[in-house]
Image (cartoon, rainbow, N blue to C red):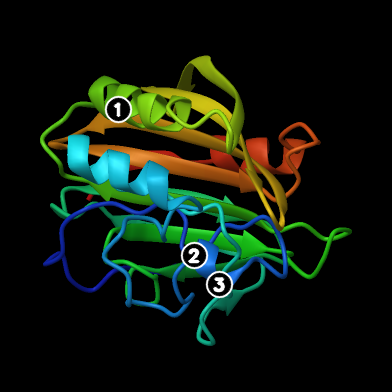
Amino acid sequence: MTIKRLGVAALGLALLAGCGDGAGSEESESASPTPATSTEAATEPDTERADEATKEETTVAEETDEATEAPEDARTGEGTFTAPTLSGRVNLTIDAPEGWEAYGVEEAITDFDLITLMKGGTGPEDPLESIIVSDQQIGLDAQGTMESMYQSYGSDAERYSGLTELAPLTLDGTQFVGFEVVSNTQSGTSRIQYWFADIDDTVIGIFVHHGNGDEPMPDELIALRDSLTISPA
């Protein structure tokens, strides 16, 4: 199955249309998980503090690490999902295993989430797993975007731990820079990775979320992240 975005009028980012610490996240920690209602990238961050620091310093939009529900029109089942960047000059394609929900920018929580994949989130034994591929046109390159978000998370050691800059990652010939962090909230912990690359005239972000911060990032999520391909539109 292929999901293609019909227009390229919106700007911005968004890597997870709804990532979370699992079912039961408190409403005060995240805005309503309904599509196209948030102007924050990738869904709202799990901490208001990190979000505010990002917006004030660089306007970099962050993915949420709070649980959200997939929209009712989400596509389900195994398939290949494709979306253009906001400029329309580059296509991003990612494979989705059976059992994952997937949706494009029309169904995403923000206008910047190009591809969103989700599964799980029913409870502690079934933590929410998410990947969002987003487009960020904010005037910073990939390295600057990564450093800004890294510093934002590093400024709140009470809620974020294990902040680690990761070795550069090459996907389909393109180098991504990124970091990993564990989010600690009243509803539980989440392990999160952010990856950024300069592609065409913008920065593409990949938000990888696992709703159990006590576990390493699952191999399935790593393989799904690594399946991203990049091609001219």
Q: Helix, strand or loop at disc 3?
A: helix
Q: Amino acid at mark 3?
A: Glu
Depicted 174 relative to depicted 89: above or below? above
Foreground tag (1 vs 3): 3
Of 46 and 97, the residue lying toward us: 46
User: Who comes first in sequence, dot 1 or dot 3?
Assistant: 3
Instruction: Report if the CB atoms under discs 3 and 2 are less than 8 Å apart.
Output: yes
Residue 40 visible in rendering: yes
Counting from the top left corner in percent of width and height, residue 61 is at 30, 48
Left or right placement of residue 171 versus residue 102 in this view: left
Dot 3 corresponds to which residue?
Answer: 27
Dot 2 corresponds to which residue?
Answer: 30
Dividing the picture into quarters, in which one does residue 21 lie?
bottom right
Residue at 24% x, 33% y is: 199
Dot 1 corresponds to which residue?
Answer: 148
Instruction: Report if the CB atoms under discs 1 and 3 are less than 8 Å apart.
Output: no
User: Who comes first in sequence, dot 2 or dot 1?
Assistant: 2
Q: Amino acid at mark 1?
A: Ser
Q: Helix, strand or loop at disc 1?
A: helix
Depicted 182 relative to depicted 3: above or below? above
The number of numbered badges drawn on the structure is 3
Residue at 56% x, 28% y is: 180
